[in-house]
Amino acid sequence: MAEPAQERTEQPTAKRLEEARRHGQVPRSPELTTAAVVLVAGIGLRYFGSHAAEALRALMQSDLSLARSQVLDPAALIPSFATSVSQALQAITPILGLTLVAALVAPLTLGGWNFSFEALVPDVSRLSPLGGLQRIFSVRSVVELLKAFAKFLIVATVAVTFLWKNTGALLALGAEPLRAGIADAAALGSRALLSLAASLVVIAGIDVPWQLWSYKQRLRMTRQEVRQELREHEGSPEMKGRIRRAQQEVAKRRMIQEVPKADVVVVNPTHFAVALRYDEQRMRAPIVVAKGLDEVAARIREVAVEHGVPIFEAPPLARALHRAVPLGGEIPVPLYVAMAQVLTYVYQLRTARQTGAAPPNPPRIDPGVEAAADPGAPADAPDAPDAPDAPDARH
Protein backbone atom coordinates (compact mmCIF):
# COMPACT_ATOMS: atom_id res chain seq x y z
CA MET A 1 0.00 0.00 0.00
CA ALA A 2 1.14 3.52 -0.73
CA GLU A 3 2.21 5.56 2.25
CA PRO A 4 -0.15 8.37 3.22
CA ALA A 5 0.92 11.85 2.27
CA GLN A 6 2.97 13.41 5.02
CA GLU A 7 2.76 17.01 6.10
CA ARG A 8 5.78 19.21 5.52
CA THR A 9 6.48 20.05 9.13
CA GLU A 10 10.30 20.07 9.13
CA GLN A 11 12.55 23.04 8.45
CA PRO A 12 14.66 22.74 5.27
CA THR A 13 18.10 21.29 5.81
CA ALA A 14 21.33 22.90 4.65
CA LYS A 15 21.46 20.48 1.73
CA ARG A 16 17.90 21.38 0.68
CA LEU A 17 18.72 25.10 0.80
CA GLU A 18 21.88 24.55 -1.24
CA GLU A 19 19.96 22.57 -3.87
CA ALA A 20 17.38 25.36 -4.06
CA ARG A 21 20.12 27.94 -4.68
CA ARG A 22 21.59 25.71 -7.37
CA HIS A 23 18.20 25.71 -9.10
CA GLY A 24 18.02 29.52 -8.85
CA GLN A 25 15.54 29.56 -5.95
CA VAL A 26 16.53 32.33 -3.54
CA PRO A 27 14.36 34.74 -1.54
CA ARG A 28 13.74 37.98 -3.40
CA SER A 29 11.59 41.01 -2.63
CA PRO A 30 10.61 43.20 -5.61
CA GLU A 31 9.27 45.77 -3.16
CA LEU A 32 12.71 46.13 -1.58
CA THR A 33 14.28 46.81 -4.98
CA THR A 34 11.57 49.31 -5.92
CA ALA A 35 11.90 51.16 -2.62
CA ALA A 36 15.69 51.32 -2.93
CA VAL A 37 15.58 52.60 -6.52
CA VAL A 38 12.98 55.30 -5.77
CA LEU A 39 14.77 56.36 -2.59
CA VAL A 40 18.16 56.63 -4.30
CA ALA A 41 16.60 58.44 -7.27
CA GLY A 42 15.06 60.97 -4.90
CA ILE A 43 18.37 61.52 -3.14
CA GLY A 44 20.19 61.83 -6.45
CA LEU A 45 17.64 64.30 -7.74
CA ARG A 46 17.97 66.33 -4.55
CA TYR A 47 21.74 66.72 -4.84
CA PHE A 48 22.27 66.57 -8.61
CA GLY A 49 18.86 67.62 -9.89
CA SER A 50 19.56 71.34 -10.18
CA HIS A 51 22.80 70.78 -12.07
CA ALA A 52 21.21 68.24 -14.40
CA ALA A 53 18.18 70.47 -15.02
CA GLU A 54 20.35 73.47 -15.83
CA ALA A 55 22.51 71.40 -18.20
CA LEU A 56 19.42 70.07 -19.98
CA ARG A 57 17.96 73.60 -20.21
CA ALA A 58 21.15 74.93 -21.78
CA LEU A 59 21.24 71.99 -24.16
CA MET A 60 17.63 72.57 -25.26
CA GLN A 61 18.30 76.27 -25.75
CA SER A 62 21.35 75.46 -27.85
CA ASP A 63 19.48 72.93 -30.00
CA LEU A 64 16.56 75.28 -30.56
CA SER A 65 19.02 77.96 -31.71
CA LEU A 66 20.31 76.02 -34.72
CA ALA A 67 20.45 77.88 -37.99
CA ARG A 68 18.08 76.87 -40.80
CA SER A 69 21.01 75.69 -42.92
CA GLN A 70 22.15 73.31 -40.15
CA VAL A 71 18.67 71.86 -39.72
CA LEU A 72 18.33 71.15 -43.46
CA ASP A 73 21.87 69.74 -43.83
CA PRO A 74 21.97 65.99 -42.86
CA ALA A 75 25.76 66.06 -42.72
CA ALA A 76 25.63 68.71 -39.98
CA LEU A 77 22.40 67.61 -38.23
CA ILE A 78 23.48 64.04 -37.37
CA PRO A 79 26.74 65.04 -35.59
CA SER A 80 24.82 67.77 -33.77
CA PHE A 81 22.23 65.22 -32.62
CA ALA A 82 24.94 62.83 -31.43
CA THR A 83 26.62 65.63 -29.47
CA SER A 84 23.29 66.57 -27.84
CA VAL A 85 22.62 62.97 -26.80
CA SER A 86 26.12 62.68 -25.31
CA GLN A 87 25.72 65.91 -23.33
CA ALA A 88 22.27 64.87 -22.08
CA LEU A 89 23.63 61.52 -20.85
CA GLN A 90 26.50 63.28 -19.11
CA ALA A 91 24.04 65.56 -17.34
CA ILE A 92 21.90 62.74 -15.96
CA THR A 93 24.70 60.17 -15.46
CA PRO A 94 25.04 60.77 -11.67
CA ILE A 95 21.34 60.08 -11.09
CA LEU A 96 21.24 57.13 -13.49
CA GLY A 97 24.41 55.68 -11.97
CA LEU A 98 23.00 55.84 -8.44
CA THR A 99 19.71 54.19 -9.45
CA LEU A 100 21.61 51.47 -11.36
CA VAL A 101 23.72 50.66 -8.30
CA ALA A 102 20.59 50.56 -6.13
CA ALA A 103 18.85 48.22 -8.59
CA LEU A 104 21.82 45.83 -8.52
CA VAL A 105 22.66 45.95 -4.81
CA ALA A 106 19.17 45.87 -3.27
CA PRO A 107 18.34 42.26 -4.32
CA LEU A 108 21.71 41.05 -3.02
CA THR A 109 20.91 42.23 0.51
CA LEU A 110 18.16 39.61 0.81
CA GLY A 111 19.14 36.53 -1.18
CA GLY A 112 22.77 37.25 -1.94
CA TRP A 113 24.50 36.77 -5.27
CA ASN A 114 23.31 33.69 -7.12
CA PHE A 115 23.74 32.71 -10.75
CA SER A 116 22.29 29.40 -11.86
CA PHE A 117 22.48 27.88 -15.32
CA GLU A 118 19.74 25.44 -14.31
CA ALA A 119 17.32 28.35 -13.95
CA LEU A 120 17.91 29.14 -17.63
CA VAL A 121 16.80 25.69 -18.79
CA PRO A 122 13.24 25.83 -20.22
CA ASP A 123 10.67 24.14 -17.97
CA VAL A 124 8.14 22.37 -20.19
CA SER A 125 5.84 21.69 -17.24
CA ARG A 126 5.13 25.43 -16.97
CA LEU A 127 3.41 25.25 -20.36
CA SER A 128 0.65 23.09 -18.91
CA PRO A 129 -2.72 24.94 -18.91
CA LEU A 130 -3.79 23.08 -15.78
CA GLY A 131 -0.60 24.05 -14.00
CA GLY A 132 -1.09 27.66 -15.08
CA LEU A 133 -4.62 27.71 -13.66
CA GLN A 134 -3.36 26.23 -10.40
CA ARG A 135 -0.75 28.98 -10.14
CA ILE A 136 -3.31 31.69 -10.95
CA PHE A 137 -5.78 30.53 -8.30
CA SER A 138 -3.22 29.52 -5.69
CA VAL A 139 -2.91 31.06 -2.23
CA ARG A 140 0.32 32.74 -3.26
CA SER A 141 -1.39 34.46 -6.23
CA VAL A 142 -4.17 35.73 -3.96
CA VAL A 143 -1.61 37.09 -1.52
CA GLU A 144 0.29 38.80 -4.34
CA LEU A 145 -2.97 40.35 -5.59
CA LEU A 146 -3.78 41.68 -2.12
CA LYS A 147 -0.25 43.00 -1.80
CA ALA A 148 -0.51 44.83 -5.13
CA PHE A 149 -3.85 46.36 -4.15
CA ALA A 150 -2.53 47.43 -0.73
CA LYS A 151 0.57 48.90 -2.35
CA PHE A 152 -1.58 50.84 -4.80
CA LEU A 153 -3.68 52.28 -1.97
CA ILE A 154 -0.62 53.31 0.06
CA VAL A 155 1.26 54.88 -2.85
CA ALA A 156 -1.87 56.57 -4.19
CA THR A 157 -2.67 58.01 -0.76
CA VAL A 158 0.86 59.39 -0.37
CA ALA A 159 0.86 60.81 -3.91
CA VAL A 160 -2.53 62.49 -3.55
CA THR A 161 -1.56 63.90 -0.15
CA PHE A 162 1.69 65.28 -1.56
CA LEU A 163 -0.07 66.91 -4.52
CA TRP A 164 -2.73 68.34 -2.23
CA LYS A 165 -0.19 69.92 0.11
CA ASN A 166 2.02 71.25 -2.72
CA THR A 167 -0.67 72.52 -5.08
CA GLY A 168 0.38 76.12 -4.50
CA ALA A 169 4.04 75.38 -5.19
CA LEU A 170 3.15 73.53 -8.40
CA LEU A 171 0.99 76.36 -9.69
CA ALA A 172 3.65 78.93 -8.77
CA LEU A 173 6.21 77.26 -11.05
CA GLY A 174 4.53 78.76 -14.12
CA ALA A 175 5.06 82.32 -12.83
CA GLU A 176 8.73 81.91 -11.98
CA PRO A 177 11.68 82.74 -14.28
CA LEU A 178 12.84 79.81 -16.38
CA ARG A 179 16.03 78.96 -14.50
CA ALA A 180 14.49 79.40 -11.06
CA GLY A 181 11.42 77.43 -12.13
CA ILE A 182 13.53 74.51 -13.38
CA ALA A 183 15.54 74.41 -10.12
CA ASP A 184 12.37 74.53 -8.01
CA ALA A 185 10.77 71.83 -10.16
CA ALA A 186 13.78 69.55 -9.57
CA ALA A 187 13.59 70.15 -5.83
CA LEU A 188 9.84 69.50 -5.86
CA GLY A 189 10.38 66.31 -7.83
CA SER A 190 12.98 65.19 -5.31
CA ARG A 191 10.56 65.70 -2.41
CA ALA A 192 7.89 63.80 -4.30
CA LEU A 193 10.20 60.82 -4.88
CA LEU A 194 11.35 60.81 -1.24
CA SER A 195 7.72 60.84 -0.07
CA LEU A 196 6.89 57.91 -2.34
CA ALA A 197 10.06 56.15 -1.21
CA ALA A 198 8.94 56.47 2.42
CA SER A 199 5.71 54.64 1.62
CA LEU A 200 7.59 52.00 -0.40
CA VAL A 201 10.01 51.44 2.49
CA VAL A 202 7.03 50.62 4.71
CA ILE A 203 5.76 48.16 2.11
CA ALA A 204 9.21 46.59 1.77
CA GLY A 205 9.44 46.28 5.56
CA ILE A 206 6.32 44.10 5.43
CA ASP A 207 7.23 42.24 2.23
CA VAL A 208 10.78 41.17 3.19
CA PRO A 209 9.73 39.09 6.25
CA TRP A 210 6.87 37.65 4.21
CA GLN A 211 9.20 36.62 1.39
CA LEU A 212 11.62 34.97 3.83
CA TRP A 213 8.81 33.09 5.55
CA SER A 214 7.24 32.08 2.25
CA TYR A 215 10.59 30.86 0.92
CA LYS A 216 11.15 28.65 3.96
CA GLN A 217 7.58 27.36 3.74
CA ARG A 218 8.02 26.32 0.12
CA LEU A 219 11.16 24.38 1.02
CA ARG A 220 9.79 22.66 4.12
CA MET A 221 10.28 18.90 4.20
CA THR A 222 8.47 15.86 5.50
CA ARG A 223 10.06 13.75 8.20
CA GLN A 224 10.55 10.99 5.67
CA GLU A 225 12.50 13.35 3.40
CA VAL A 226 14.70 14.43 6.32
CA ARG A 227 15.39 10.80 7.27
CA GLN A 228 16.09 9.91 3.65
CA GLU A 229 18.53 12.81 3.28
CA LEU A 230 20.26 11.88 6.53
CA ARG A 231 20.51 8.28 5.35
CA GLU A 232 22.03 9.37 2.04
CA HIS A 233 24.44 11.69 3.81
CA GLU A 234 25.63 9.34 6.53
CA GLY A 235 24.75 6.01 4.96
CA SER A 236 22.30 3.35 6.13
CA PRO A 237 22.83 1.72 9.56
CA GLU A 238 23.77 -1.54 7.85
CA MET A 239 26.39 0.18 5.71
CA LYS A 240 27.75 2.11 8.69
CA GLY A 241 27.94 -1.15 10.62
CA ARG A 242 29.90 -2.85 7.85
CA ILE A 243 32.24 0.14 7.58
CA ARG A 244 32.75 0.15 11.35
CA ARG A 245 33.51 -3.57 11.39
CA ALA A 246 35.94 -3.17 8.50
CA GLN A 247 37.68 -0.32 10.31
CA GLN A 248 37.91 -2.40 13.46
CA GLU A 249 39.42 -5.29 11.53
CA VAL A 250 42.02 -3.02 9.95
CA ALA A 251 42.84 -1.49 13.33
CA LYS A 252 43.05 -4.95 14.89
CA ARG A 253 45.46 -6.20 12.21
CA ARG A 254 47.57 -3.08 12.55
CA MET A 255 47.64 -3.51 16.32
CA ILE A 256 48.61 -7.20 16.08
CA GLN A 257 51.52 -6.23 13.82
CA GLU A 258 52.96 -4.22 16.71
CA VAL A 259 53.07 -7.20 19.11
CA PRO A 260 56.43 -8.59 17.82
CA LYS A 261 58.00 -5.21 18.67
CA ALA A 262 56.80 -5.37 22.28
CA ASP A 263 59.08 -6.04 25.27
CA VAL A 264 56.48 -7.90 27.32
CA VAL A 265 52.83 -9.00 27.22
CA VAL A 266 50.96 -8.79 30.52
CA VAL A 267 48.01 -11.22 30.68
CA ASN A 268 45.16 -12.21 33.01
CA PRO A 269 45.85 -15.07 32.02
CA THR A 270 43.12 -15.61 29.38
CA HIS A 271 40.69 -12.66 29.50
CA PHE A 272 43.12 -9.73 29.17
CA ALA A 273 46.34 -9.21 27.24
CA VAL A 274 48.34 -5.98 27.02
CA ALA A 275 51.56 -5.65 25.01
CA LEU A 276 54.02 -2.94 26.06
CA ARG A 277 57.19 -1.50 24.59
CA TYR A 278 59.79 0.70 26.31
CA ASP A 279 62.78 2.54 24.85
CA GLU A 280 64.54 4.45 27.59
CA GLN A 281 66.31 6.63 25.02
CA ARG A 282 63.13 7.93 23.39
CA MET A 283 60.28 7.23 25.80
CA ARG A 284 59.42 8.74 29.15
CA ALA A 285 57.45 5.64 30.18
CA PRO A 286 56.36 2.31 28.61
CA ILE A 287 53.57 2.58 26.05
CA VAL A 288 50.76 0.17 25.17
CA VAL A 289 51.17 -1.09 21.60
CA ALA A 290 48.35 -3.68 21.67
CA LYS A 291 45.59 -4.76 24.00
CA GLY A 292 42.44 -6.81 23.84
CA LEU A 293 39.90 -9.08 25.49
CA ASP A 294 39.13 -12.76 25.04
CA GLU A 295 39.70 -13.66 21.35
CA VAL A 296 41.89 -10.63 20.70
CA ALA A 297 43.82 -11.38 23.88
CA ALA A 298 44.34 -14.96 22.70
CA ARG A 299 45.62 -13.73 19.34
CA ILE A 300 48.05 -11.33 21.06
CA ARG A 301 49.41 -14.20 23.15
CA GLU A 302 49.80 -16.42 20.04
CA VAL A 303 51.77 -13.75 18.19
CA ALA A 304 53.89 -13.12 21.28
CA VAL A 305 54.74 -16.82 21.55
CA GLU A 306 55.56 -17.00 17.83
CA HIS A 307 58.03 -14.11 18.08
CA GLY A 308 59.50 -14.90 21.48
CA VAL A 309 57.97 -11.96 23.36
CA PRO A 310 57.86 -12.72 27.12
CA ILE A 311 54.39 -13.22 28.61
CA PHE A 312 53.91 -12.17 32.24
CA GLU A 313 50.82 -13.29 34.16
CA ALA A 314 49.61 -10.56 36.54
CA PRO A 315 45.77 -10.26 36.53
CA PRO A 316 45.49 -7.00 38.55
CA LEU A 317 48.17 -5.29 36.46
CA ALA A 318 46.68 -6.57 33.18
CA ARG A 319 43.23 -5.29 34.12
CA ALA A 320 44.65 -1.95 35.24
CA LEU A 321 46.62 -1.48 32.02
CA HIS A 322 43.67 -2.43 29.83
CA ARG A 323 41.25 -0.06 31.58
CA ALA A 324 43.52 2.90 32.30
CA VAL A 325 45.84 3.15 29.29
CA PRO A 326 44.61 3.86 25.72
CA LEU A 327 46.26 2.23 22.75
CA GLY A 328 49.51 4.07 22.05
CA GLY A 329 49.39 5.83 25.42
CA GLU A 330 51.93 5.90 28.24
CA ILE A 331 51.24 4.05 31.47
CA PRO A 332 50.14 6.31 34.36
CA VAL A 333 52.38 7.16 37.30
CA PRO A 334 50.62 4.74 39.75
CA LEU A 335 51.78 1.84 37.54
CA TYR A 336 55.43 2.89 37.32
CA VAL A 337 56.62 0.68 40.20
CA ALA A 338 54.76 -2.43 39.00
CA MET A 339 55.98 -1.99 35.41
CA ALA A 340 59.52 -1.38 36.62
CA GLN A 341 59.37 -4.72 38.45
CA VAL A 342 58.03 -6.48 35.35
CA LEU A 343 60.59 -4.97 32.96
CA THR A 344 63.45 -5.64 35.34
CA TYR A 345 62.39 -9.25 35.56
CA VAL A 346 62.09 -9.51 31.76
CA TYR A 347 65.57 -8.04 31.22
CA GLN A 348 67.05 -10.36 33.86
CA LEU A 349 65.30 -13.35 32.27
CA ARG A 350 66.65 -12.41 28.85
CA THR A 351 70.20 -12.09 30.22
CA ALA A 352 69.93 -15.42 32.04
CA ARG A 353 68.91 -17.23 28.90
CA GLN A 354 71.72 -15.67 26.91
CA THR A 355 74.33 -16.65 29.51
CA GLY A 356 72.81 -19.98 30.53
CA ALA A 357 72.35 -18.87 34.14
CA ALA A 358 69.44 -19.83 36.35
CA PRO A 359 66.27 -17.80 35.65
CA PRO A 360 65.32 -15.18 38.25
CA ASN A 361 62.29 -15.48 40.46
CA PRO A 362 59.26 -13.55 39.14
CA PRO A 363 58.28 -10.51 41.22
CA ARG A 364 55.08 -10.25 43.24
CA ILE A 365 52.76 -7.54 41.91
CA ASP A 366 50.76 -5.67 44.51
CA PRO A 367 47.06 -6.61 44.05
CA GLY A 368 46.11 -3.01 44.88
CA VAL A 369 47.76 -1.73 41.71
CA GLU A 370 44.45 -1.99 39.84
CA ALA A 371 42.62 0.30 42.27
CA ALA A 372 45.56 2.72 42.32
CA ALA A 373 45.52 3.09 38.54
CA ASP A 374 41.73 3.18 38.18
CA PRO A 375 39.89 4.15 41.39
CA GLY A 376 36.54 3.34 39.80
CA ALA A 377 37.51 -0.23 38.93
CA PRO A 378 36.29 -3.11 41.13
CA ALA A 379 38.80 -4.70 43.43
CA ASP A 380 38.31 -8.10 41.84
CA ALA A 381 37.05 -8.36 38.29
CA PRO A 382 34.37 -11.07 38.00
CA ASP A 383 35.68 -12.24 34.64
CA ALA A 384 39.22 -12.98 35.74
CA PRO A 385 40.78 -15.38 38.26
CA ASP A 386 42.63 -14.17 41.31
CA ALA A 387 46.31 -13.39 41.04
CA PRO A 388 48.57 -16.33 41.72
CA ASP A 389 51.07 -16.24 44.51
CA ALA A 390 54.02 -16.39 42.13
CA PRO A 391 53.39 -14.96 38.63
CA ASP A 392 55.43 -16.55 35.95
CA ALA A 393 56.94 -15.31 32.71
CA ARG A 394 57.19 -17.58 29.70
CA HIS A 395 57.81 -17.37 25.94
Image: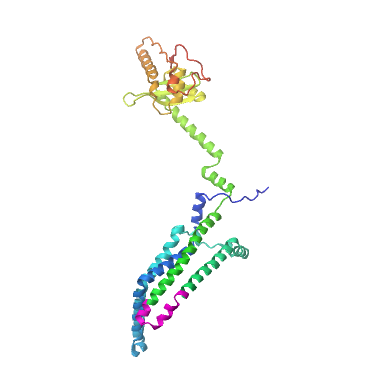
Image height check: is 272 above or below 135?
A: above
Mark count: 0
| Direction from residue 341 to residue 140 in the image, left or right | right
Residue 169 in percent (x, y) is at: 42, 77
Residue 361 in percent (x, y) is at: 40, 11
Q: Work out whether residue 145 or residue 159 is closer to the camera in this orientation and state it.
A: 159
| Direction from residue 3 to residue 360 in the image, left or right | left
Residue located farthest toward the bottom when viewing the structure as drawn: 68
Camera sees residue 209: yes
| Direction from residue 1 to residue 187 in the image, left or right | left
Q: Work out whether residue 99 or residue 323 is closer to the camera in this orientation and state it.
A: 99
Residue 326 in percent (x, y) is at: 43, 28
| Direction from residue 149 to residue 168 in the image, left or right | left
Image height check: is 42 above or below 116?
A: below
Quadrant where the C terminus lies? Answer: top left
Bounds of the magenta segment: 164-183
Residue at the spot x=41%, y=65% of the render? 102
- Location of residue 187 by image quarter: bottom left
Q: Work out whether residue 283 or residue 181 is closer to the camera in this orientation and state it.
A: 181
